């Protein structure tokens, strides 16, 4: 199995692009550039050797003739190898597709799926995967699917618990799928503004600051998706209450960061830890019950504060202001995981 994340190894409706890239990365170790069929949905092209300019009268020693013969032979070897590898590529891809996705492909086009299975054709298989997982909707009507893809792209916004890098990938996939279905491609500035518009409310301050500065002429509004993403990714998000993981805390983070519990022994509350050590049921780390607002007894809080990194209290109970801690180097603004 790949060393990548399990969520990238197994195909789902949420990870088409990452799944394809992980598949290519792993399969390329053995099969080289033949795995590009997974990205392009086309087999590698081997153009015939051009012999039209060969002049036997000018090739007394037959060197040119032998060179052409070798080129033709090498091409045929490559073509034969590519055809031989096709069933192996099909098997690699099928081995990463769960039954739920197989059923979805059968429902979409049972005949095409069966044909790809009989012929063990990776090209047909990856087209089915793309059409059922990258392109929104499950209608067999092309016009309906075109509409579904367009509406999915227009409605693509960042989710409450989604990191901005994942949102970017999903955003690009949704718009690429809309174009694949025959919708017009948006210009770069529209893409940037749509991405900006779809940012979650925890970026509300960033959005307001950017808009205000652009309106005053202090800066120019980013005109490409990449630039807009970079702007948002560099912005520090200060949040009180629930973090993107649904945990009660106060933290400062850059957008690509993921809140990380700082404990000496590296313990992480994954739902299976010792509930007698401040777990507090479903209410979050150290919380009481579902509310997560306090502890059930007077035992000291055993972990470090996200703000000042001292033990004994949570970040929202921290007596030190965020700015003071940042100046003292107490907040690692880099990463939340």
Image (cartoon, grey):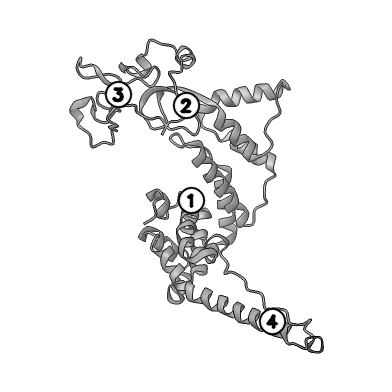
Earlier in the chain: of badge 3 and badge 2, it is: 2
Q: Nearer the viewer, residue 60 or 263?
A: 60
Q: CA distance from mark 1 to mark 2?
A: 25 Å
Q: Which residue is mark 3?
A: 292
Q: Are marks 3 and 4 in contact (CB under 8 Å)?
A: no
User: Where residue 68 is drawn, which disc sits there?
Assistant: 4
Q: Quadrant of residue 277?
A: top left
The answer to whether residue 84 is above or below residue 4 is below
Residue under pointer 2 = 253
Q: In which quadrant will I find the N terminus? A: bottom left
- Residue 185: where, in percent of width, then height? 67, 50
Residue wearing tag 1: 18
- For mark 1, does the 10 Å Cα neighbourhood hold few (<14), some (14 to 19), or many (20 or more) residues? some
What is the CA distance from the residue labelled 1 to the residue labelled 4?
42 Å
Give the position of the C terminus as an image quadrant: top left
Earlier-in-chain disc, 1 versus 3: 1
Residue density around tag 4, few if under 14, some if 14–19, many if 20 or more, within 10 Å: some
Mark nearer the viewer, 3 or 2: 2
Quarter holding residue 271? top left
């Amino acid at each position: 199995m790949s060393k990548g994340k399990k969520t990238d190894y197994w195909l789902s409706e949420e990870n088409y692009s990452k799944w394809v890239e992980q598949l290519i990365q792993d399969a390329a170790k053995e099969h080289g550039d033949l795995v590009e069929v997974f990205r392009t949905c086309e087999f590698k092209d081997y153009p015939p050797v051009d012999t039209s300019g060969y002049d036997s009268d000018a090739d007394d020693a037959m060197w040119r003739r032998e060179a052409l013969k070798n080129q033709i032979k090498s091409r045929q070897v490559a073509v034969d190898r590519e055809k031989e590898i096709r069933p192996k590529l099909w098997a690699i891809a099928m081995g990463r597709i769960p039954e739920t996705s197989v059923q979805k492909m059968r429902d979409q086009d049972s005949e095409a799926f069966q044909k790809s299975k009989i012929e063990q054709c990776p090209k047909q298989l990856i087209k089915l995967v793309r059409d059922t997982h990258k392109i929104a909707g499950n209608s067999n009507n092309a016009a309906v699917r075109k509409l579904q893809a367009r509406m999915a792209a227009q409605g693509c916004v960042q989710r409450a618990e989604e990191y901005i890098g994942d949102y970017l990938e999903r955003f690009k996939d949704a718009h690429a799928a809309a174009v694949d279905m025959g919708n017009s491609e948006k210009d770069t500035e529209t893409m940037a503004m749509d991405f900006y518009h779809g940012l979650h409310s925890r970026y509300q301050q960033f959005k307001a600051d950017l808009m205000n500065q652009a309106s005053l002429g202090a800066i120019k509004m980013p005109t490409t998706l990449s630039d807009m993403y970079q702007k948002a990714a560099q912005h520090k998000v200060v949040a009180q209450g629930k973090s993107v993981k649904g945990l009660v805390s106060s933290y400062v983070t850059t957008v690509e960061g993921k809140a990380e519990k700082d404990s000496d022994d590296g313990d992480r509350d994954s739902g299976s830890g010792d509930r007698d050590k401040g777990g507090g049921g479903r209410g979050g780390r150290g919380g009481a019950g579902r509310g997560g607002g306090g502890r059930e007894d007077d035992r000291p809080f055993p972990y470090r504060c996200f703000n000042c990194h001292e033990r004994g209290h949570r970040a929202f109970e921290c007596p030190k202001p965020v700015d003071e801690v940042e100046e003292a180097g107490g907040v690692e603004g880099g990463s939340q995981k």
